[in-house]
Each structure stands twice: as C-alpha cells, then as structure tokens.
Amino acid sequence: MAYDEENILLMTPGPVSFHPRVYRAMSRVEYHHRTPEYRKTFAECISMMKEVMQTKNDVFIFAGSGTSAMEAAIANCVSNGDKVLNLINGKFSERWKEITETFGGKSIPLEVEWGKAIKPEMVGEALDRNPDVKFVTLCHNETSTAVLNPGQEIAKVVREHDKILIVDGITSVGGDYVYPDEWGFDILITGSQKCLGCPPGLGMIMVGPRAWDIIDKRERIPSYYLNIPSYKKEFEKGSDTPYTSSIPLVYGLHESLAMIIEEGYENRVKRHRRMAKAVREGTKALGFQLLAEKGHESNTLTAIKYPKEVEDGVFRKTMRGYGVLIAGGQAHLKGKIFRVAHMNLTAEREILLTLAITELSLRELGFKCGKGVGVSAAEEVFLR
Amino acid sequence: MAYDEENILLMTPGPVSFHPRVYRAMSRVEYHHRTPEYRKTFAECISMMKEVMQTKNDVFIFAGSGTSAMEAAIANCVSNGDKVLNLINGKFSERWKEITETFGGKSIPLEVEWGKAIKPEMVGEALDRNPDVKFVTLCHNETSTAVLNPGQEIAKVVREHDKILIVDGITSVGGDYVYPDEWGFDILITGSQKCLGCPPGLGMIMVGPRAWDIIDKRERIPSYYLNIPSYKKEFEKGSDTPYTSSIPLVYGLHESLAMIIEEGYENRVKRHRRMAKAVREGTKALGFQLLAEKGHESNTLTAIKYPKEVEDGVFRKTMRGYGVLIAGGQAHLKGKIFRVAHMNLTAEREILLTLAITELSLRELGFKCGKGVGVSAAEEVFLR
C-alpha cells in the first residue's frame, strides 16, 4: 500500500502518464540544436503542432511551462492601460487577470461561480457595457473546476464586437474539439504535459493575423525571453529558436504528436469524450455529484464533489496506496472536490480501474456505496 | 563520413554530451510534481545546486533556458530608468544590454573588443564617471569568445562602489572557480546544458541579500512567469514551484549534480583547467592562434582563429563527418573562429580524439601542419 513513485497511474490533470515511445524518443543521445537534423525535427514538430491545433496560423514553442505561453500572449499583445475583459470561472482563468495586471493591462473581470460556465450572452453584455475593451481572455477548459466553456460561441460574440480573443487551451488542445481558425481564436496557448502526452516543460502559442496586427505595431515588447517576433524571425530564417530549445522534450513532443496524428483527430476527441462520459456516469452511480454545471462538463477531466463523509486527504492517500494518483481541489475548492483526468492515452481499462479503485477506497473508508455500480455504469457507456 | 546524429561527440559549448546516468534518471516513469516524493527530489536539487554554486544564498530553478534566468535577473531587479553598466565583450554579455533595455533600464555599455577581457580598472573608471549607476552586469565566461573575465576582481570594484552585480555564469558554474558569496556576486545565473551536464531546459538563479533588498522593495515586478518572490514563497511553503516543473529535466539535473559532488569541486575545476590547457597547447602546436587575450583564456571552452587557408563551413563539416561536433563563431566572428568546448565529462580521451580529428581534417583539406604535434603537445600537458 505504500506509494510507489515509479508504478503509479497518473489520473491527474497534468502531468499525465505517457507512452513508452515518448520515453524512447526523449532518451535518444543528446543532439545539438543548431544542426540541420535538429532543425528538421523542430520544423516537423511545428507543422504537426499546427495540425493538432487545427490551425494554419503561426505556432511557436517555448522552453517553459504552459504559464510561459500565457505570459507570452499578454506580454506581446497588451500595452500599458489596455482594457482586458478577463472571463473568470476558476483558478486558471483567474491567472489571465494576474498576468494582465503584471503587464499593466487594466483588467475588467467577468466572474462567475467556480463550477459554472461562462455564457456567450454574459460576454456580449460585458462588451456592450465596456466598449473600450481591447482584449478578451478565456480559459477554454477550466482545469480547476472541470468546466468546458463554450469556446466557439464566446469567440463569435467577441468577434462581433471586434475584440482580440486570447484563449488558454492547455487542457483542451489534443483532447477535445478546438478549431481556432474556424471559431476565431486570435491567440491560443497550450502546454506539453496534458492532452499532448509529453512531460512538462514546453509551452506553445498560436498567433493569428489579428493578433499579429497588434504585435507588429508595438514599439516595445516588455519581454525578451518570450518575445514572439524573435521566435518568428529565427524560425523563418532556419527553423530555429532564438534561445536554446529543450531538446529532449522536443523529441518527446515530436513522437507524441506523431502518435496523435496516427490516431486521428476525430478518433482521439471521440475517445476522450467517451471516457469522460464513463467517468461521469460511473462516479454518479457511486453516489457522487459533479461540480461542473450540467451541459458544460469537461471532456478531459472530471471534478467530483466529496460527500461530507469522505475526507479529501485520506481518500486520495488511499487511492495513491492502490497505485492511482488523482488530484484534489484548488484554492477554495481544496477539500471539497477531487479531480480525475482522462487525457492522452486514457482508455477503457484506465477508467474501469480508476472507478474500481475508487469504490474499493470508499468502502475501505466506510462509505456506503452500491457494489460494482461505478464500473458497471461505465461499462454501459462503453457498450452503447 | 555522413553525420550520424546519434553517434557524435558534442564538443560544442552547450549542449554537451552527458553521462548515461543522466539519461537513466530522465527516463524514469513520469511523476507528478505535487507529491511529497517529488518535492523531496526538488529540494535536494536546490540544495546540491547551492553546493555546486558555492553559495548559501537562495537558488531557484526555472523551466526555461539560461536566457530565462537572465530575464528573471533583470525583470526582478531593474526598475524603469535605472542605470545599468553593461560590461560587454561578446554576444552573451551584449544580451544583458538587450534585456536591460527591454525592461526599461538605461544601459551604459562598457565595450571592449571581442576576445579581450574586461579589466577591473575599466569598471572602476566607468563607475567613477557614472556614479548614478545602480547595477553592473557581467558575463563571467564569455562563450562567444572563450574569454574568462576576472570575476573576483571586478566584483571587488563593484562592491567598493556599492553597486549590485548581476553575473552570467552559464559556462563557468560547474566547470571553473566561481565563489559568489566570497567574491560578492549579488545575482548569479546559469543553465543546465553546459558544465552542469544536463540537457537544456532549466535556468537557475542565485539571489543574494543585497539583491533581495532591491526586489523586496519593488512595487511591481514586470514578469509573472519569472517572478522570483513567487518562487521563493512556493519553495518555502513546500519545496514547490509556482508553475509546473520540467520534471524529467529536474531528475536529470539531480543525477548530474550528484555526480558533480561525487567528483569534488576542486577535482572538477582542476580537470577542466587541465583539459583547457591541453586544447590550447594542442591547437597552438597545430599552428593556430587563440582568440582570447593572453591570461584571460576560458577554462571551459577555447576559441581558435582560422588561418586564411581554412574555410569554416568545410572544416567543421569535415570534423562532423568524423563524428566530432565543434562550434563556429557568432555574429562578426562567424567564419573567423571555431570553438571547442571542454565541459562536463570531457577528459583526456575526448581532448586527444578532438585534436587528432582536427589534424586529420586539416590535412585532408590540404592545410600544412606538423604531424601528430597537436596530440603530443596535449600529452605533454597531461604527463606534466
């Protein structure tokens, strides 16, 4: 029952367990990044990243976490005093506000209760009330609450108001439908360690033409390390990066993106959606309630409310002891929810295993739940 | 003779070839970073990093390249309008100026010819002429020219003038003597892929008490991703980082730092210095001249001037074909010099091999040089 760091199933919303092919790619002998061979690999990565992101816009990869890509978005676009409508319904959407303020933007927060979705009409009203807003930030899939915000519908309203939309797709890109070009996302950022199935350490950013219009006109971009025009220049010059690439992570990403493309976009999204449904049905059958507003549940992770009899720390430790790592709540949701991710490779066996271990742990802790009901509810989904 | 990406000796000034133990550490099954086990590993990393950096000050690790740590130094310390004396004798010391200006600092450049060292008396004079300077930036070991600037002596002058000294130790820390506490460096940054023997993707920063005095008094730090007080807070709270750690790279660093400590500081520095001497003697015996000013040659890499008969691209391609990768010059030194690094694991066999392949390549290209003279000159150094 002791926690075995090397034999654990990561059902956490990043980092996720990933494929041996990715390990093998990463453990290739160290290369130098200023060689034609590495540049070719890097260029392929960018091109596969565009395919997975469903975009024809520019995409850049930073040596940094997903937050580095968020910082790049704001630092390159938002000038001192620019008004930014920050759509907030959780910890990660709140981060956009913090970064906006760090770079001197004037944040107009539109906050809804954590667990609820942002609705397009709220965004429309806020933009009507604040016609001088220049940017809107959205967290497409709020990882802290497992709420999928209606990205397409929100983008439509933002475009109608002629604002620039900056989207965090850290836990949607590669797992759920995201069509930035079709929907009208101007900036879309993501990270390597979620649905893209890699270790953490790479941040990606897509920059569309309307965002370029803003960036190109700036006199001074207040970041050197994350200066997007530098990345563009070096990539165009020779598939290069201005600063040293995280070489092994780029090799891992290259392999993981190839696997994502092998699976196929539709297949991958449908698998994620089927797994999500099974987790929702399974946990509800065990007697739990979901945090996310009905109709807005995330397809890459699920947030589940604790009944008052179950104590967060003890429960997750019990799960861990059985070799399954899940996540707790964040900020004021700490102790109130747990989160199960179903990203990247997660398939029927991981879902059934997780539900079975959940049931075992609950029963061990004296919680009354129907026997085998979680697993069988999930099976129903799979057999449908 | 074709370049084999996986069977190449990296004699480049980062990334460097590294030990199989580092690969093995990196390829451990993916962990979650918010677990007690990971926090313990991360805390050990910080503590070993302090030992290798010879400091009792705070040290933080970023998911980012060495340049991210440079950006962190300036963004956290330099306020709009602050005067910064940028000591410049190469491409990387010039980067401090660029970052200073990105963050609104007023750069006072003190430039000397690339290949020459910055002398403490020049710094003293510049500070006398500019009493309102607040910060001084120094690149301890200039990787673009293979010049080791006299860090200790410069620090003494800077401290006498009561300025804050920010030092880039990217190619000195872990390979040559660097005593930031004793010498009086206020900030010291480095990166994972040079003398520390890891892949690229981690930047480190040491923050001393005089730098903290500045940082603690700032009203707004214009970076979110690289906000040092956030890193301090999370580390003190639970050996944690504010944003997701580059997990496999941290495991690699942990192993590499352990190996550095096993070798011993003095042994390691002396080995680097002996290898450097052998490269210098060997290349001079082959008829080359060094770029670095006499008495200021770097001990972790050597920059060698091309005689007019040898063409950079052809020469390096020939070396590559024999499985040895070396670096060319940068900026206006492109085509005029080549650079051979002797970092991390480099020992007698790599030095002799590199000199022998250099001789073979030169002779193949029709350059007249004494037979076996490079290797034998290096052997003399080793046998002394």
Image (tube, coloured by chain):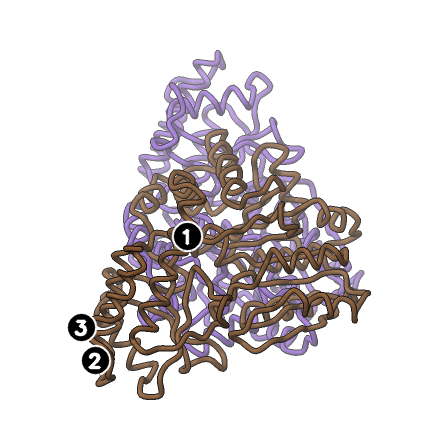
Chain colours: A brown, B purple
Task: Give me the chain letter of mark 3.
Answer: A
- Is tag 3's residue or tag 2's residue first in the polypeptide sequence? 3
How far is disc 3 from disc 1 in space, using C-alphas? 37 Å
Residue found at x 63% / y 34%: A236
Residue B381 visible from this viewpoint: yes
Label 3 residue SS: loop
In front: label 3 or label 1: 3
Horizontal side of residue A264 vs A243, given as left or right: left
Task: Give me the chain letter of mark 1.
Answer: B
Q: Amino acid at mark 2?
A: Arg
Q: Amino acid at mark 3?
A: Met
Residue B239 in the image: x percent, y percent?
41, 73
A288 or A8, which is in the foreground?
A288
In front: label 3 or label 2: 2
Label 2 residue SS: helix
Report which residue position mark 1 lands on. Answer: B196
Report which residue position mark 2 lands on. Answer: A363
Q: Residue lying furthest top in this view?
A: B366
Report which residue position mark 3 lands on. Answer: A1
Horizontal side of residue A380 vs B363, given as left or right: left
